[in-house]
Image (spheres, helix red, strand yellow):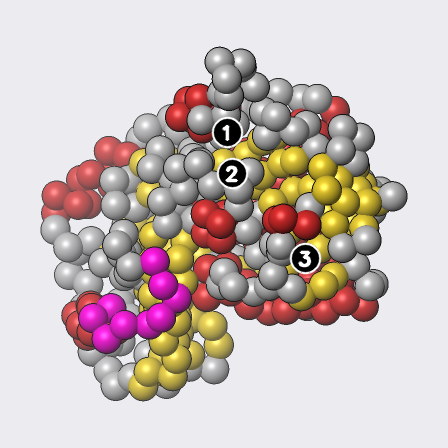
Amino acid sequence: MIDYIIVGAGLAGIAFAETALDNGKSIYVFNDQSQNSSKIAGGLYNPVILKRFSEVWNAKEQLELLYPFYNKLEVKLEQKFDYKLPLLRKFYSAEEQNNWFTASDKPNLTQFLSPELVTKKWQHIDSPFNYGEVLYSGYLDTPLLLDSYKNYLIKNSIYTETTFDYSKLIVNEDYVGYDGIQAKHIVFAEGFGMLANPFFNSLPLDGTKGELLLIKAPELNLELIVKSSIFILPVGNGYYKVGATYNWEDKTNIPTEVAKKELTDNLKDLIHCDFEIIEHYAGVRPTVKDRRPLVGTHPLYQNIHVLNGLGTRGVMLAPAMANDLFNHIEHQMPLDKNIDILRIKTFVSSLYQNGQKC
């Protein structure tokens, strides 16, 4: 018998798999690649919500786990994933500058926002009101990480690429069984695919479609991240990721011309040089209306767990949430009420049967 079956190999699944392995636990991963939000993600991480100049929830704690977690994976998989790059927020008015200065004086934001304006001018970008610099920012090469980790799992014979059949899951008090494998626990980290999961599909996973572009702009010569209405992120050799859109209605992974035009129009407003669109990606982010992850143990089955709802900040959230869930399962440490699925009263009430509490 192994310790964990893990369903899903996006950022959430990988984070839990690696946390379990790092603590001497045995795992087996099932994944069908139907959800590609991690693979197409920009991979950008920063501790500030730039639209409102406010701190990302628990940013300091997440960063403390982020750096050692991904650095250890780089060593283990012999690949470079984490690129620490400055992030500049372009200002469009003196009012935005003033809002930045006000935010940078707040105790919870002082460590993340530079109080000095960045006045340097980059060719092909107009910036009459200059920039503000976000500290502790960068991006993760998520496609390379996911592919490298998948290859590692395959090499160690602990991975099967298949669509998980919930009807075949055997649930006993002391173990779960699936496809001939018995485990003490099963963790579902399926992203937007959770809506098909009969154990957790009543959780309020909303899903937000995002689209981004990979462009080539050899004249741009940008070596840092610039954020305006979109972000432009250098990935080397004159290539840049440009994103992202937000669509709360369309739940497909199909790129659209509407989003492509939106991104292209915003890009033309930001940079003034020729560029070529190389790729156009789309995926559905696993978002939650209260903007907090969905983590915890099923009220009826103490060996069935969920790690989901990382939304647009999966790179930052994944190591921390995986660590919290692991400690909750293995050491009975209580989960933060902000992430515990038991905060979702409609989910808990849906499990009442015949007047009995789960």
Instruction: Indicate the secondary structure of the residue bearing disc 3.
Output: strand
Task: State yes or no: discs 1 and 3 in contact (Cβ < 8 Å).
Answer: no
Q: Which numbered disc, 2 or 1, marks the residue that appears first in the sequence?
A: 2
Label annotation for residue 200: 2
Instruction: State the residue at coordinates (39%, 57%).
Output: 284
Residue 63 falls inside the magenta stretch: no
Q: Position of residue 199 (x, y in %)?
A: 55, 38
Which amino acid, mark 1?
Ile
User: Does residue 131 lie above or below 52 as drawn?
Assistant: below
* Location of mark 1 (residue): 341
Compare residues 189 and 346 and report the one nearer the observer: 346
In this rendering, the answer to whether 352 lies above or below 270 is above
Tell me: residue 190, above or below residue 108: below
Nearer to me, 55 or 194: 194
The residue lying at 50 percent from left, 60 percent from top is 35
- Give the distance between the C-alpha atoms of the residues marked 2 and 1, in whole angstroms: 10 Å
Q: CA distance from mark 2 to mark 3?
A: 17 Å
Q: Is residue 29 visible?
A: yes
Q: Position of residue 312 (x, y in %)?
A: 41, 50
Q: Secondary structure at mark 2?
A: loop
Could you tell me if the residues under marks 2 and 1 are in contact, i.e. CB atoms within 8 Å?
A: yes
Query: Looking at the rendering, which quadrant does residue 242 occupy?
Result: bottom left
Say which of 289 and 195 sits in front.
Answer: 195
In the image, what residue occupies the spot 55% across and 34% down?
Answer: 295
Q: Which mark is residue 30?
A: 3
Q: Earlier in the sequence, mark 2 or mark 3?
A: 3
Question: Magenta span covers which residues?
Answer: 251-259
Q: Identify the secondary structure beneath mark 1.
A: helix
Magenta highlight: main SS: loop
Report the side of 129 relative to 244 (left or right). left
